[in-house]
Structures are given as structure tokens and as C-alpha cells.
Image (cartoon, rainbow, N blue to C red):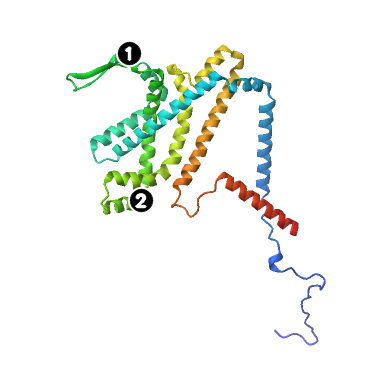
Amino acid sequence: MSEPPGATITAPAAPPADRPSKPLAAQRVLPLRRPGRWIATAVVLVLVAQFTHGLVTNPFYQWDRFGYWFLRPSLLDGLVITLEVTAYSAVLGLLGGILLALARLSKSPVLRAVSWTYVWALRSIPLIVVLLFLYNFSALYKTLSVGVPFGPAFFSFDESKLATDMVIAVIGLSLNEAAYAAEVVRGGILSVDQGQHEAAAALGLPKGYQFRRIVFPQALRSITPNYVNQLIGLIKSTSLVFYVSLLDLFGTAQSMGSTYPGDIVPLLLVVTVWYLILTSVVSVIQFYVERYYARGATRALPPTPLQKLRDGLTDLRARIRREAAV
């Protein structure tokens, strides 16, 4: 388009000489403002502070009595029983779960039916009912025998002499745990890629070797987090063995509470803190087990808490240097 006669074209003004434009590398990129996140963080911090203040200053909790009971020998003896019952039940439950999972995946219809029925029944019956039934098992069967069905018995024994309180608690928890562990293990085995099974079969490896060295190690990546959830539930379920006359941590606290009724709340706090410690230890072990079995499946192993702390401090120092340089 032509300009009218006498018109002049004005060029854009150049930047002042005393204010040169910054090079692109020196320009700062401001992060996107997120006021909602800061508001939510402030609200949560206020609620946490109020909860902590009420927990510490409320005289109803009797923290002096909490300190008195926390390391009492009687409660520590109950804690040892809790650990024993948990350890035995976890091992037996996992072994039983593996056998049930293999039976569920078997080509034998009898094994599949028996395994499915066991899992269905034990997951349907409350654990307290299982424990009480086993506790009164001697009233139903005075003696147990092994022999030919509907025929002579090879040998028999008195059930009441073998079924101590510890044995009843371990058997009841193990039976219940095996039903849930079976589904966890079965899900882990099914998560292994079918090509792994086919490759192992193509090499002519025995079935047992395939399971131990190829299938099961890969399945553990999926089994570990799910079974640790079961293990944490098992730790808390040990509180039910009090109903079969076994004084674990919770049972000892209940007995002490009946003797010292004014200390019921501190005793319950002691039990709560010990269960928190146990489940926290299990969670830490879970992290390192998952990290171990993640080798070869991820490009880089997840950082440990110490590595995260060190990286965070390094990033903080680098950010402070950048701020100081600007």
C-alpha cells in the first residue's frame, strides 16, 4: 500500500543505551503461581499443629504414666509373645499360601477344588471365630488319630496335651493367613509374562526349577507389597489371641488395665506406639526388599531415604547459590 505524499515512516524506537536487554541465558523463568496449594498447605499445617498441641497438653493422656509403662517388663514380655506369634504365623501362612496357590493353578480338578474351597471358607469366617473354635477343639475331638479312613488307626494322641495357647494362636492365625496369602501369591505368579514360562519350557528346564529360579523371583516384585500389607494386618490381628488366653502385648495391657483402672488410657497409648513401631519397621524392610527385586526391571533403582535427604540438601545449596548470584 503506497503512502500519501508528504508522509513519513517512523521506525520503532531503539532500547535506551543505558538499559541493554539481558541475554536469554541470564533471564529468570518465574514458576507458575499456585495459591491453592499454599492455602491447602497452610490449613493442613494449622490442623497438624492443633492436633499435636492437644495431644501433648491434654492431661487426660497422662504422659508421665505412659513413660512409666512403656518399658515395663510385663509389657515387654507381651511384646515378645506378639513377635513370636507374628513370626511363626507369617512363615507358616506364606508357605501354606504358596502351596494353595500352586494347587489353585494346578491342572488337577481335585486340587483346584480343594484349594478354592479352603480359600473361600477361611476368607469368609471371622478370625475370632476360627480362634475360638480351635480353642474349644478338644471338646469336639478328644483324640486325633492317623490311619485308614473308616478303618483301623495307626496311632492316636491326646489333642489337649499338644494344643497349648501358643500353638492354638499360631495355628489359627496361620490358617487364616494362608487363605489370603494364596491369592496374593497366585496374583503374583499370574503377573509374570507368559513368554517367561514359554522360554523356560523351551530350554527344557524342569518345572520345579522354572518356578524357583525364573517364575517366583519375578513374581516377588508383585507379591512383596501385597503380602507386606497382609503382614501388617497380621501384626494387628495378634491382638485377638487374648481371647484364647494368650497374653500378648494387647492382652497384657488389658490385664494391667483391669488392675490399674486409672491407667487404661496410658496403657492403650503404649500398645498403640509399639504397634506403630512394629509396622514402621516392616515398612522399611518392605522398601529395601522391593528395591532389591526392582533390579533389572527399572532403569534406575529408587533412591533410599538417605539418598533423598542428601539430594534435597544438595538442591537447596544450589538454589541458595543461584539466589545469591542474582
Nearest the viewer among 187 and 272 is: 272
In the image: residue 152, left or right of residue 172: left
| Residue at the spot of label 2 | 193
Residue 42 visible to the viewer: yes
Position above or below: 190 against 74: below
Quadrant of image for the N terminus: bottom right
The x, y position of residue 135, in whole percent, is 38, 17
| Residue at the spot of label 1 | 139
Packing grade of label 2 (10 A; few <14, some 14-19, many >=20) is: few
What residue occupies the far left of the structure in this picture?
Answer: 151
Type of amino acid under label 1: Ala
Q: Looking at the image, which residue is at 39% across and 18% down?
A: 132
Q: Looking at the image, which residue is at 81% across and 86% down?
A: 6
The x, y position of residue 85, in whole percent, is 44, 25
Find the distance from the CA under tag 2 to the CA under tag 1.
Answer: 50 Å
Residue 326 visible to the viewer: no
Position above or below: 137 against 292: above
Type of amino acid under label 2: Asp
**Residue 142: which quarter of the image?**
top left
**Residue 273: which quarter of the image?**
top right
The image's mark for residue 87 is none
Quadrant of image for the C terminus: bottom right
What residue occupies the far right of the structure in this picture?
Answer: 18
